[in-house]
Image (cartoon, helix red, strand yellow):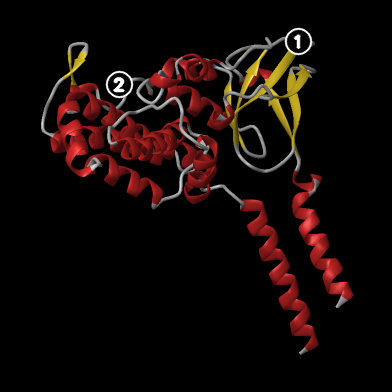
Amino acid sequence: MKKIFIAILSVFLFSKSGLSQSTINIPVKKLKIKYQNGEAIYINRINYFEYDQTNYTIDTVFVKNSMISFKKKDDNQFLILLNNRKEIPITYLPLIQLREHYTSMFCGNFYKSDNYLLLSNQFNSEEYDYLNKFYKKFSKKSFDLELYEGPDYKKMDVTDAQNLVEKRKQKYLKDLNRKQQELSQKFIEYLKTEIELGANNQFLNWYEETYSKEIEKEFKTTNTSKIHQNLYDDFISKKWNKNSIQYFRTIERIINFEESKKRKKLSTYFKNIEKRKEKAQKLKEKTASNVGVRDERATQCVLSLSAKRNERKI
């Protein structure tokens, strides 16, 4: 029995230890920005739920033999920004400076910088190139271009607007499906989250602006908005990639929506919400696809090992 316990403990520690670490090697020649040998590079991890923290730089390394190399402490996927200057990641600036507008503000230009990478265990040049090209065309009007008349939104039937956004969304998903053999499942999951939730967020931007009076009236009589509620219920029933900025925006929307119910008036942003971060964490635990992945794998190893020991006894 003691040996079984030691074996189980060893498996658990194996899953938690540095054996899950990996060294990420990024050839400079594969990047759009050509860093020089000896140049200091700051490895910034992008986590929108911690945008107000200052610990985003997870490593500082020097280019050696035309290679950027750093240790990754776990096998979880995350978004990084390479920079040769120590400065706040550009995608954090709107959250720091204009948080109240951020749920309705989308700027693909932030990602048009060529030094964003989505990493799991190794650098993949095909995924880097695809991400770069994806954000070149993924802009403010990616889904709702046909909902505009000149610089402003135009009013139309809600179902018609949803269909137009859905059509654009399916185009992005179709383009992604063509590359399924070349891209990892984690990478595809990230982009699907960006596409599907990006479509929802841009549709809601249009709906909130063009149907503001109708929404206000509905909130006064029912203390909710069916359009919002249906989209948020669907979101909560599924799993999403937590690295996506669209995932962060959706979590923020839901928290403010629930606060709107308390205050009996819809707003996309309330500055003071009690336990905002705790509420965000609870929603992440329900909806993030990559929460607890390593723990589950360790549990499976333990169960498998225990079963084998029991078989031998029988």
Instruction: Indicate the quadrant where residue 92 lies.
Output: top right
In the image, is residue 312 above or below residue 140?
Answer: below
Residue at position x 60%, y 34% in the image: 78
Give residue 164's position: percent from left, percent from top. Answer: 20, 32
Give residue 141's mark: 2
Give residue 44's position: percent from left, percent from top. Answer: 65, 23
Q: Residues within 10 Å of mark 2 (few under 14, many from 20)?
A: some
Distance between the Cα atoms at labels 2 and 1? 37 Å
Give residue 68's position: percent from left, percent from top. Answer: 73, 22
In the image, is residue 246 above or below residue 237?
Answer: above
Q: Earlier in the sequence, mark 2 or mark 1?
A: 1
262 displayed left or right of 14: left
Tag 1 secondary structure: loop
The quarter of the picture where the N terminus appears is: bottom right
80 displayed left or right of 160: right
Contact between labelled residues 1 and 2, with CB atoms less than 8 Å apart:
no
Which residue is situated farthest in the bottom direction here? 314
The quarter of the picture where the C terminus appears is: bottom right
